[in-house]
């Protein structure tokens, strides 16, 4: 009987402890600011270990950075976080906004990366086409005239014909800085 009474009292205390209402803190962080804070926290926490080391070397600590950015302290964040966790609908709403924002950010950066790749490919094609046009124009010069000016040097047609244009347009190895 003693064990049964103890078990019933334990269950009652647990239920009362879980249903305890948390009062609204006087310095509650707004939902909008909580979303921004959680987004920044997620972005900073997802940094690579190398980037985290660079941050620490420069005396930038993620939590203090976020608290300073939003002009809050750790106690205010903890109280606001506890308040919202006891209000499940509010917390779900906050986390849904965080998730949606991060998804949009990811999509934006993927599109930006794809655009940069396309631009790089286009530049590569354009420079290759420019080289090919230059080669073709040199061949046309060799066919059309007996004397041609290449740069500031006049050259006879037989001198131009002796030049293997394909060999002249090969890329050279870069010079090492070492």
Image (cartoon, rainbow, N blue to C red):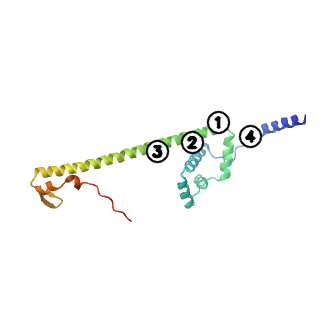
Report which residue position mark 2 lands on: 98
Q: Sequence-wise, which precedes: disc 1 or disc 2?
A: 1
Q: What whole-number distance in Å separates the C-alpha atoms at marks 1 and 2?
A: 14 Å
Q: What whole-number distance in Å separates the C-alpha atoms at marks 2 and 3?
A: 17 Å
Report which residue position mark 3 lands on: 109
Frontmost of labels 4 and 3 is: 3
Quarter of the image with the N terminus in it: top right
Which element is circle 3 on? helix
Say how many tags the image has: 4
* Apparent side of residue 83 relative to residue 131 in the rendered image (left or right): right
Vertical comparison of 64 with 83: above or below = below
Report which residue position mark 4 lands on: 21
Vertical comparison of 23 with 55: above or below = above
Q: What whole-number distance in Å separates the C-alpha atoms at marks 1 and 4?
A: 15 Å
Characterize the local packing of mark 2: few (<14), some (14-19) or many (20 or more) Cα atoms within 10 angstroms: many
Report which residue position mark 1 lands on: 89
Q: Sequence-wise, which precedes: disc 4 or disc 2?
A: 4
Given the current orientation, which residue lies at the most extreme right position? 1
Q: Hey, which quadrant is residue 8 in on the image?
A: top right
Q: What whole-number distance in Å separates the C-alpha atoms at marks 4 and 3?
A: 42 Å
The picture places residue 15, in percent across and down from the top left corner, at 78, 37
The picture places residue 25, in percent across and down from the top left corner, at 69, 46
Q: What whole-number distance in Å separates the C-alpha atoms at marks 4 and 2?
A: 25 Å
Frontmost of labels 1 and 3 is: 3
Quarter of the image with the C terminus in it: bottom left
Q: Hey, which quadrant is residue 156 in on the image?
A: bottom left
Q: Sequence-wise, which precedes: disc 1 or disc 4?
A: 4
* Apparent side of residue 107 relative to residue 139 in the rendered image (left or right): right
| Tag 4 near tag 2, CB within 8 Å | no
Q: Nearer the viewer, residue 151 or 135?
A: 135
């Amino acid at each position: 009987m003693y064990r049964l009474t103890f078990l019933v009292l334990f269950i009652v205390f647990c239920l009362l402890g879980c249903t305890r209402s948390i009062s609204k803190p006087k310095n509650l962080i707004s939902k909008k600011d909580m979303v921004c804070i959680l987004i920044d926290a997620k972005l900073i926490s997802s940094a690579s270990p190398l980037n985290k080391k660079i941050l620490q070397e420069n005396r930038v600590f993620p939590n203090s950075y976020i608290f300073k950015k939003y002009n809050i302290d750790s106690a205010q964040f903890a109280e606001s976080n506890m308040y919202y966790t006891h209000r499940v609908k509010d917390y779900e709403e906050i986390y849904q906004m965080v998730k949606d924002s991060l998804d949009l950010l990811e999509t934006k950066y993927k599109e930006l990366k794809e655009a940069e790749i396309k631009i790089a490919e286009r530049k590569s094609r354009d420079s290759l086409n420019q080289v090919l046009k230059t080669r073709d124009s040199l061949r046309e010069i060799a066919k059309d005239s007996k004397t041609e000016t290449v740069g500031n040097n006049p050259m006879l047609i037989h001198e131009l014909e002796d030049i293997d244009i394909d060999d002249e347009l090969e890329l050279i190895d870069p010079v090492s800085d070492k």
